Amino acid sequence: WVLTATARSPTNIAVIKYWGKRDETLILPVNDSISVTLDPDHLSATTTVAVSPSFDRDRMWLNGTEISLSGGRFQNCLREIRQRARDVENKEKGIHIRKEDWEKLHVHIASYNNFPTAAGLASSAAGFACLVFTLAKLMNVSEDGAALSSIARQGSGSACRSLYGGFVKWVKGEAANGSDSIAVQLVDESYWNDLVVIIAVVSSRQKETSSTSGMRDSVVTSTLLQHRAEVIVPSRILQMEEAIKNRNFGSFARLTCADSNQFHAVCLDTTPPIFYMNDTSHRVINTVERWSQFEGAPQVAYTFDAGPNAVLIAPSREVASLLLQRLLFFFPPPPDTKLEGYMVGDTSI
Ligand code: DP6
């Protein structure tokens, strides 16, 4: 027999960035972060996990290609879920798996994502959130979202925020064992649903420095990171929570842009310096900043993760549509750079 479970998880985009760990194995961050979870129809991971007594080892395929599971992160997530597995009864197929059987059973996992992997678009966030959620579903785990978020966190830090929709805060926590380093939902996906997210795919090439190694170097060498984690982020988190609660787009956009720029400043302050943005990224920033100056207030927020692609957040469909026109017609990318395309967070524009 074979028993399967399938689930889909969206990716999330941080508006107050996570950058730096205080514990590399448990994946505990140096500061709180806040993100917005995207609509799963556009950027998401879909995972199917199968279990069968005929499987002789755990195996995983990512977008159709088998990948190695020797990495500790995958094993940690699997172990945490297995420890919480419960009896599973499937009368239709005549299957009864007892809690203690899960230790001996192996799983086959197939995961797909519908966006450029490792182009700095946080595909690992959707991937690990989906893996943990699907395993928990298959193994009948009863833990709530917060407990699952702390397991997903051990796969990839940003993954813990993808367990919820809407705006989500990853609380860094204080405990050495990571028990209080969990994601909490600030507001759900219907609270501020006029926002439109546009992703300008500047490059779908694999990024040169992974987030994991980049943030490791920043923690060791950047004094700006230390100041950011201790002084800047705590007050920014409070302001961002207030902006979200009041749906204050001006304040939201100012904080989002400032935090993205500071994150990239920390990257530059790292030895050796890390460059995630390229000329086209800088041009997109200029375009948005000039537009805001012209109108006297932020019209759109921009934010960049560990790659050159721009994530733009507009307060409404009308503004998003104007922004697209502006980017495409008034400020075309310079001839020597190639803008590979736009993925629009809301296809009805
Ligand atoms: C720039 O979650 O990919 O996207 O925990 O090492 O897997 P690991 O790193 P990851 O880092 C994401 C960094 C970021 C900012 C963010 O999403 O908060």
Image: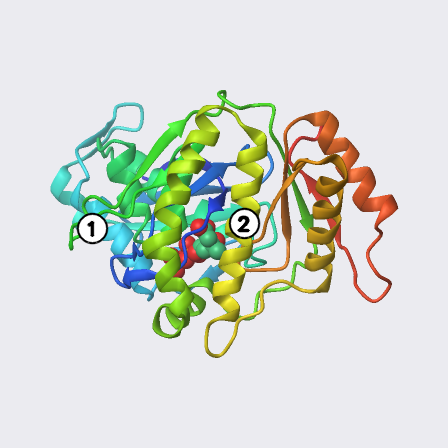
Q: Residue placed at 30% from the left, 43% from the top? A: 171
Residue bearing mark 2: 258
Rendered-image quadrant of the N terminus: top left
Q: Are marks 2 and 1 in contact (CB under 8 Å)?
A: no
SS type, badge 1: loop
Q: Residue 192's spot in the image, x, y percent?
A: 53, 24
Q: Residue placed at 41% from the left, 70% from the top? A: 222
Lower position in the chain sequence, tag 2 or tag 1: 1
**Residue 217 visible (yes or no):** yes
Q: Residue 337's spot in the image, x, y percent?
A: 79, 63
Mark-to-mark CA distance, 2 and 1: 29 Å
Instruction: Specify the quarter for ligand 1.
Output: bottom left
Apparent side of residue 86 relative to residue 317 in the rendered image (left or right): left
Instruction: Residue type at mark 1: give it.
Output: Gly
Name the outermost residue toward the front: 296
Name the outermost residue toward the top: 190
Instruction: Residue type at mark 2: give it.
Output: Ala
Q: Quadrant of residue 140?
A: top left
| Position of 294 relative to 75 (above/below) | above
Q: Residue 200's spot in the image, x, y percent?
A: 69, 48
Rendered-image quadrant of the C terminus: top right
Disc 2: CA contacts within 10 A as few (<14), some (14-19) or many (>=20) = some
Tag count: 2
Apparent side of residue 298 relative to residue 158 in the rendered image (left or right): right
Disc 1: CA contacts within 10 A as few (<14), some (14-19) or many (>=20) = some
SS type, badge 2: helix
Residue bearing mark 1: 178
Q: Residue placed at 40% from the left, 63% from the top? A: 225
Q: Nearer the viewer, residue 144 or 5?
A: 144
| Position of 318 relative to 71 (above/below) | above
**Residue 131 visible (yes or no):** no
Q: Nearer the viewer, residue 7 or 333?
A: 333
